[in-house]
Structures are given as structure tokens and as C-alpha cells.
Amino acid sequence: MLWAFCNVAPAATPAISPALQSASVTTTSFTFSATLLTPLLKGESVKMDYGNGLKAMHCVEQACTLALTASKNLLSAESVDYTIGVYDVKKNVQGEVQTGTFSLSAMTITPDTLTQTPVSAMRVLAAVVKFTASLTAPLTKNDSVKIDYGKGLKIMTCSGKTCVLSSNVLPVQTTANYTIGLYKGSVRQYDTLSGSYHPASAPPPVTPSSYSKISNTGAVLEDSATQGLGEAEWACTKDNQTGLIWEIKNTDKGLHNNIATYSWYDATVQGSAAKGKINGGVCYESRCDTESYKNAVNAAKHCGAENWRLPTRNELMRLIYCSDGNYSTLSSATGYVCTNGNVVTSPTINTTYFPHITQNYWVWTSTQDTISRSYALLVDFKVGYVDDYTKISANHVFLVHR
């Protein structure tokens, strides 16, 4: 739930006249959309499960939508898993389902895997933001309450001493301003209430206290610990906000070498092009693709763990650190996380806890492209950018586990 609150002392008015007393902004609901590769057959339906059981989507030809009222639990969750698939009349799934995560607070949704499901894409279509204003007294004849939230003056609907307006036509910037005023006809009466609201919330800035150093055996270390191969030396970094533990790089010519590169490969993905490329990078002590590297790190029980994996797009995005403190929330799969990518300090990561990262550092995620299955998403830590790239190319890897 997003709030904007401001009190303005109104000019002296007769007791019978209303005056604006307070204002608030609440994100209330979201509409998800899915695109089908082909129209549904008779008896088929598209259904989505985001933790509350299967919900049927409304489909017109190949476009399907589902409106979701955001509960307090969903709004406060960092991310929510979802599945979406095509079902026949007997509720049997046709093909495989698409899975991913979404964040109501960030208004984003990311498919983590695209399989053979007839569903080709899933995204947030719109967010409905509800503005509420309170009056000291009900409106009198010819009075109205109007709001400008970046789209010109709009009349609010008033009942008693409460006025509301809901809109899904929102500014694209992270923070926007609003003003609310009391009008008699077209003439504003008294002062206005003003404030700001957030159609999209940016990732939180990364601070040193966000991280802890982890030893080669998995123990939490003092912040003064140094890198090394000893049991009590630093080899991994924990994000204290998410609980995720990340591998870090070193300059040894070994498994965690900082300049080693890997092609994207996953043998479980269907389709030869979608699997990626075996051994397409330059590395040490493993075959140079993401699957082989992951297997080698797990076999070595790095930092005491055997469940290392590639991070999702959303997980890896959290490591982006924008030196000017200006973050953007992506409205699509790719784009700038650092609002001012041309001026931030490179690399855009906390190098105190992720050492030996060069300026041009492109890192693979597990998230595949929604348009071309021969592409996957990566994070460019030079400018704080999320991009898609062909899986046969060679890039860096940060493995993660919980």
C-alpha cells in the first residue's frame, strides 16, 4: 500500500463550507495479461495460480486478462510465484505451464521459464491507483473536488465528506506529484493539498549493512575477514535482506576466476536452440557453460552448499548499486535499473562485498527471453542495465543459493 499525506491549513471559511482536510493514495488492484500463440480450442481455458488456487482468465481470441485485488499480504511480499497454463474441460493442463514471479509493490512480472505451453507471454497490464480526499463538511451546491496527478484536472467522486478517484493512466516516472483542490464551478476555493505518490517503487539502495561475509564452510564471518581458501576465510556474500547467498570471484586460475566466461546452457529446456550452447566460454576447472559450472560448484560444496543455481532476473537485479541513488523500476523485461546509467560509477555493484568485478561485466540470469527462446536475460554491471542476449555468447556467472 502506497501513501501520500499532506495537511494544509485552509483559509478562514464559514462553518458551513467544506475544506480539504487530508489526502491519500492507495494502490488497489492489478490486471495481468497473457498472450496465446494460437486461439483456444472448444472447452479450453487459461488459468493462473498465484497462491490462491487456479483462477480462470478472461480470453478474447488470443488475449487473456485477470484482474487481481491486491491484499495486504501480496503488497508486502517481495515476490510472488505464479503458474499459468491452458486447461481442457476436465481441468487437465494442456502442454506445460509457464512459471515466474511478480511483485505488486514494483508492478513488475517476470517469466522465469517458458516451456511448450501455448501461452507466449505474461505481464502486468495496468495498476489501478486510488486517490482519496477528506473534507471537513459535505460539498455544497456547485462545489466539486478536483485532482491533478500529471494528467490535468480530474473531478473526484464525493460522498459525504469523502472523495475518491481511481486511475490506471499513470505517469511512467517512479515518483509523481499531485494537487487536490476545492472548486466552485471552475474557480478554485482556498488552498490545495499537494504531495507525491509512487506508481512504481524502486529497488532499495544497497548499503554495507545489507551484506555479510561467508566462509568456505558456510559460517558468517566478521566484516574484516579477507578472501582465501582457508576454512575461516571469506568466499561468499550473504544478502541479509533476502537471505540469498552469492558466490564471489577471485583472481586465482580456478573455479571462481573473475574473468572466466560461460555460454548459457540448460539440458532440461526443450528445443535445441532453447537449450543454449555447451562449452562456449573460457574458464577453468569445468566445462565452460552455465550448467557445467553450476554442477562443478555444487560438487565442490562451495561455502558448504550443494544447491547452487543461476539467479533469476529479479534476484540478480537486486545486486545493482547506483552510485547516485537513482533507481528505476523496469516496466518490461529489459531496461535501466540505474536511472542515470550514463553517469553512475562503474561497475554498478558493491565492490566491497563483490570484489574483482571489472567495468564491462555482463552476468547471466536463469530467466529466458519471452520472445526468442534462443535468448536469455543478463545484467550489465557497467551501467546497471538488464538486457537479453543470445545463449551461445560467453558471459560471466554469479551463482546463488538460499
Image (cartoon, helix red, strand yellow):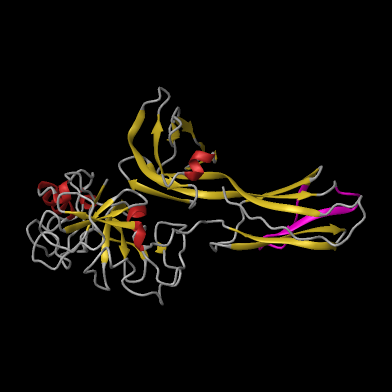
18 left or right of 278 in image: right
Closer-to-camera residue (219/103): 219
Quadrant into which the C terminus falls? top left
Q: Residue at x 56, y 49 (%)?
A: 127
Q: Residue at x 53, y 40 (%)?
A: 72
How far across and down, in percent of the image, does residue 230 sit? 10, 57
Q: For residue 172: magenta?
A: no
Total numbered badges shown on the rendered structure: 0
Residue 223, quarter of picture = bottom left
How far across and down, in percent of the image, does residue 193 sit? 73, 60
Residue 49, quarter of picture = top left
Residue 338, quarter of picture = bottom left
Closer-to-camera residue (14/83): 14
Closer-to-camera residue (86/285): 285
Q: Residue at x 82, y 49 (%)?
A: 136
How far across and down, in percent of the image, does residue 202 sit? 47, 59
Q: From which residue to which does the magenta span run?
A: 139-157
Q: For residue 145: magenta?
A: yes
Q: Is residue 3 above or below residue 81?
A: below
Visible residue check, residue 381? yes
How far across and down, in percent of the image, does residue 269 sit? 23, 45
